[in-house]
Image (spheres, grey):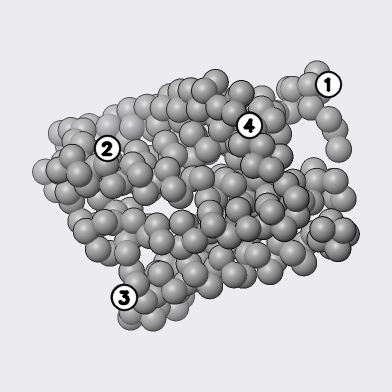
Amino acid sequence: MISVKKHPVRFILLFYLVCFVFRAIEYIFIRTDESVIGEAFIHKLIGIVLLAVALRAVHYKWSDIGFRKEQAARGICLGLLFGGIVYAIAYVSEIILQFSAGNSPSLQFFATSYSAQGNQVMQAGGLFVFICIVGNIINVIMEEGVFRGLFVKLTEEKYSFMKVCLLSSLLFGVWHIAQPVRNVLDGVQSPMGALMLGLMLVGTSMLGGIQYVLMYKMTGALWAGMAAHFVNNAIVNLLHVVTASGIDEMQTVRITIAQALSFIVVLILFLIRRKAGAIAPK
């Protein structure tokens, strides 16, 4: 434990590498997200198990990394409300854009597997909606527990908050390159196209990671960021804008609006609270 606390980045990079290997195996070989399940969840479950092992190794409790029971209900409600409002604005904006383009958009509810190149596999049954929700819950428990919980906790005592935030968010951004790499291996995208997609995914995921770290810092727990993260992922899989010419044609615009708006709001709130002395300046 002493060695880990003296050199937390080494431990974090090793832990990250192990998790990423399992992620790569599922994305490249098992491909659960391309099945009727529509969600790559196996490596997330393994990640939760590895997180539990890591917590025992460094003598942390789940509450030490942000899973505080007494703040759960309030934090979850706050995150769901915030995510819901942000995406309501994004969906309204997209619908207005569709109407201005001469289309007649409608909102429809069904489950799909999200891809940066377009949603895959439409499923209208309640079972598939349930699987989508459960898969996204597993996803946010693992990713928030690891990237905002364990990684931040291990590094915050040794490094400045800015460095902690950037390290966690950079790793979270790189976490999302698995899909572009698979696209190249499958021959469905050129290396240059995959590079551009990868840069986009890393950049947007980094901004999301920074946002969730700030929410963790402001609330003192993972719940609000976890709930907002869940809304960000699940709503893309479940609520769709449909026109005569296709489904979710402006999905990228919608997600960009939602993520940019949520990032700006969280950043402003963080700066206001820090200036007021509600957040330590470290």
Query: Residues under labels 4 and 3: Cα distance?
Result: 44 Å
User: Which is nearer the N-term, disc 4 or disc 3?
Assistant: 4
Relative depth, front residue between 160 and 150: 150
Quadrant in the picture for the C terminus: top right
Q: Amino acid at mark 2?
A: Leu
Tell me the SS state at disc 4: loop
User: Which is nearer the N-term, disc 4 or disc 2?
Assistant: 4
User: Which is nearer the N-term, disc 3 or disc 2?
Assistant: 3
Q: Amino acid at mark 4?
A: Arg
Query: Residues under labels 4 and 2: Cα distance?
Result: 31 Å
Q: Which residue is mark 1?
A: 277
261 over 4 or under it: above or below? above
User: Which is nearer the N-term, disc 1 or disc 2?
Assistant: 2
Report crowding for label 2: few under 14, some 14 to 19, many 20 or more residues within 10 A (C-alpha): some
Tell me the SS state at disc 2: strand
Q: Residue at x 27, y 32 (%)?
A: 95
Q: Residue furthest left?
A: 244
Query: Residues under labels 3 and 2: Cα distance?
Result: 26 Å
- Residue 188 numbered mark, or none: 3
- Residue 253 numbered mark, or none: none
Query: Residues under labels 3 and 1: Cα distance?
Result: 51 Å
Q: Which residue is mark 2?
A: 239
Q: Position of residue 272 (x, y in %)?
A: 73, 22
Report crowding for label 1: few under 14, some 14 to 19, many 20 or more residues within 10 A (C-alpha): few
Q: Which residue is mark 4?
A: 68
Residue 140 visible in the shown view: yes
Q: Amino acid at mark 3?
A: Val
Asked if the residue under mark 2 is in contact with the one under mark 3, i.e. CB atoms within 8 Å, the reply is: no
Q: Position of residue 202 (x, y in %)?
A: 55, 59
Q: Position of residue 94 (x, y in %)?
A: 32, 35
